Amino acid sequence: MKIYSFSPFGYEGSLVAVEVDLRRGIPAIDMVGLADSAVKESRERMKSAIRNSGYEFPPERILISLSPADLKKEGAGFDLPIAIAVLIAKNNSDPESNDDFNQNCSPTNPQPKNSGPSLLILGELELNGKVRPVRGVHAAVTTAKYTGINYCIVPTANASEAREVSGMKVFGADNLNQAFEALNNLELFTEKSSSPNIALNGFPKEAIEINGIFFPPVEPGFDFADIKGQENLIRALQIAAAGGHNVLSYGAPGCGKTLSMQRFSSLLPYLSQEKSQSVTRIYSLAGLLPSDTSIINRPPFRMPHQTATIEGICGGGQRLNPGEISLAHNGVLFLDEAAEFKTSVLQMLRVPLESGQITLSRAGRSTTFPAKFQLLMATNPCPCGNFGSKEKICLCSARSVEQYWKKFSGPLLDRIEMRVRVENKIDDAPSKSTDELRKEIASALKIQKFRQGFYNAEMTPAEIVEYCSLDSQCENYMEKAAEKFQFSPRGVAGCIKVARTIADMEEMENISINHLREAVELRQTEDIMI
């Protein structure tokens, strides 16, 4: 029986083979395999846990090998696999070779404890033998399944998370006794069972279906019907949700920018199974997966504080933990008071926005995190917030306004398809409700799903030519608009993609001149100094 554990590092992580050899000599525990302090300390924890669980600890000299030898082993999840390996070695002082998988082991055909299917085992041990939950279980089980391991033992608190991996048979252990006794009874290992809250389509039963697209129920306080006015911003957010576009809103303090953009998540549908798995993996590695959540099926909405560092936004640290842009993968990154973020933080967003991923390197090791997110930004038009206002006087000099907007470099703003000025005015007319906004969004998402399989915002130049053909009138209009507003080639492509989304929302096959006009109006920013 081959025992594996998992060392989380970056997005990938690595499986680690755990081997134990008992030798004659002065009783001691030797560990080889480049283990960090937390892993080395597992020697003492597993020793006390074995004794306090009623087992006899081997009186021989114990050698624990963690391979591959050149990979640094990190984390507290090695306690349980090492303890299990020690108990197996004690019961089988001369184990047979077990490099190959043995799929014939079953409860009706018991085999020696040194043979059987390979196992992934994770868990931290308390001194009394109880098993504590660990982070990165979803990533570990996914990696193990990919390499052909079909059985795993994890803490009970992590069992539902592990069972989300299709085909993996999981046993949730509360203590060392349960984990060791489960080795000879594979019937105890179970796969994911159908939840009473999940419908046959894989989405929660409370999901709202609109035109074949499934949305979560609108939470209290997140309905756009409660917002008075701000029609332009709400329209831009609706288009952004329908096509995956980025949005910048600017206006006087208190005009409703943040309030509207915080409700953007209510316009987004449930994630597909594939997208849910990647998001869950990231949150599991970061240790942010809620204890009552086995899989994340709603798009993340991340709203970091203005004091966030580059490492906090892009990721890093000793173990290369994911940053905010990766935690926003398949979801939204919202920067409120965006001009207050450090310039270096704002500029590092440019490459991930384009590539949908970020590569981090530390101490000779590197990892690539997915970072495909929508960027929403809200900011004031100047330091005092009154620039361009018809009711208040701006006290900022032209230079201070220019310096204020220079934080948003041209290349960064070029990647934002829609820029919306929000007026500070009172309008008693209520906006459309979230359910009403979702109807056009669902129409656009359904068309994109069957046409190209991804958001319009992700189209390449070749795909724009294929799916966004313009007639002569639209081409002439786009050329004049690009010359007037000095759009870059990326800016022109952004306008065409937004126009394609507007056409999809109206279920129109071709882009019309009206669609292009609205897209250009949402992009041009003549009234601010940038």
Image: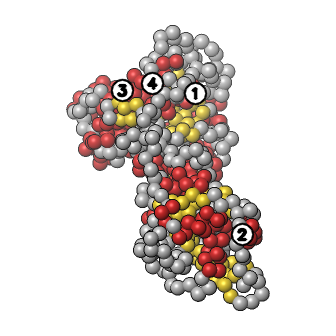
Looking at the image, residue 317 sits to the left or right of residue 333; the answer is: right
Q: Which residue is mark 2?
A: 54
Q: Earlier in the sequence, mark 3 or mark 2?
A: 2
Q: Which mark is residue 434?
A: 4
Number of numbered discs: 4
In the drawing, does residue 32 fall left or right of residue 434?
Answer: right
Q: Residue at x 51, y 67 (%)?
A: 185
Give the labeled residue for mark 1: 258
- CA–CA distance in space, label 4 to label 3: 9 Å
| Residue 29 image point, x, y percent | 73, 79
**Along the line of sight, which residue is nearer the eye, 492 or 337?**
337
Q: CB atoms at circles 4 and 1 under 8 Å apart?
A: no
Say which label, 2 or 4, has the lower sequence index: 2
Q: Position of residue 111 (x, y in %)?
A: 49, 77
Residue at the farthest top position: 428
Q: CA distance from mark 3 to mark 2?
A: 62 Å
- Amino acid under label 3? Lys
Amino acid type of the residue that numbered disc 1 sits on in the rendered structure: Thr
Note whether 221 is above or below 181 in the view shown. above
The image's mark for residue 171 is: none
Mark 4 / mark 3, whichever is N-terminal: 4
Label 1 Cα crowd, 10 Å radius (few <14 / some 14-19 / many 20+): some
